[in-house]
Amino acid sequence: MLPTRRSLLAAFLAVPALPVANRAEGQEPTLPLTPACGDDEDLTPALTAGPFYKPDAPLRHELSGDAPNGKRITIAGYVLDGNCRPVADSLVEIWHADDTGAYDTRGYRLRGHQMTDKRGRWWFGTIVPALYPGRTRHYHFRVRRPGAAVLTTQLFFPNEPQNDRDRLYSPSLLLDIRDTEDGKFGRFDFVV
C-alpha cells in the first residue's frame, strides 16, 4: 500500500534539522544532501521567470483548491546555503499553469508564497500543471534567503516526453517525485 501525501509531508516535517552546522568532523548528516550542496559554483541554477510572474502572491501553503479537478501533488524541501546549512525565514514563491495549461493573469490562482520555518523547510499542496505549447511540465519559483539576491528558477518533472524538447529544461532542476495513494509527492532543496 502506498503512503499518502499527508503521511510523507508529516515524515518530512518530523525529521530534525540538517545537523551540518554543529556536526562533529567526519560525522555524516542525517539526510542526504542536495547534489550541489557544498560547492558554491553549483548553486541551484537560475532560469527565466517567464511572462506570467505577478508580484504580491498571497501567503499560503495550499493551492490545490484553485484547481479542484487537477491531480494533487505536495512539493517540499529545504532552502540551504552554500555550506549545506538550512536557512530560516527565506522567501519561497511559486506559480504555475493549471490543469488545462493556462496561467491566471488576472488573479492569484495557483500562486502563493511562504517563509521557510526555523529549520529551513518549505512546502506547498498544489496540482500537477498541464503541458502547454512549447513547454514541458514545470513550476516557477523565486527564492530569497535573508540579505541575499532573489533566485528565480523552474523545477521539472522526471521522465516527461517534452523535457528534451523544452529549451529551458535542465536535469539539475528535476523534482524527486514519488507516487502516493492520493497523488504525488515531490522534493527539491534549493541551494542559494
Image (cartoon, helix red, strand yellow):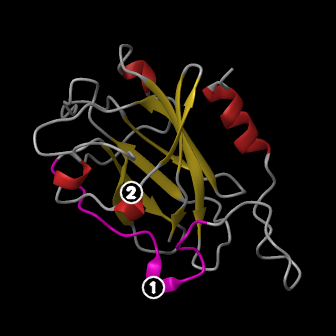
Q: Quadrant of residue 81?
A: bottom right
Q: What's drawn in magenta, residue-wise?
A: 34-51
Residue 31 visible at all: yes
- Which mark is nearer the camera, 1 or 2? 1
Q: Residue at x 79, y 49 (%)?
A: 15
Question: What type of secondary structure mainly makes up the magenta span?
Answer: loop
Tell me the tag on residue 41: 1
Name the foreground residue: 108 vs 173.
Answer: 173
Q: Residue at x 41, y 22 (%)?
A: 71
Name the residue at the top extreme. 69
Left or right of residue 39: residue 120: right
Q: Residue at x 18, y 35 (%)?
A: 105
Quadrant containing the N terminus in the rendered view: top right
Name the foreground residue: 120 vs 154.
Answer: 154
Mark 2 highlights which residue?
142
Whether label 1 touches label 2, CB < 8 Å: no
Q: Secondary structure at mark 1?
A: helix
Locate residue 189, reporting x and y percent: 55, 59
User: Magenta span has 107?
Assistant: no
Instruction: Give the amino acid type for the residue marked by disc 1 in the picture.
Output: Glu
Q: Quadrant of residue 18?
A: bottom right
Q: Secondary structure at mark 2?
A: strand
Left or right of residue 43: residue 56: left
Locate residue 176, reporting x and y percent: 51, 48
Residue 50 visible at all: no
Name the residue at the left extreme. 133
CA neighbours of label 2 inside 10 A, class few (<14), some (14 to 19), many (20+):
some
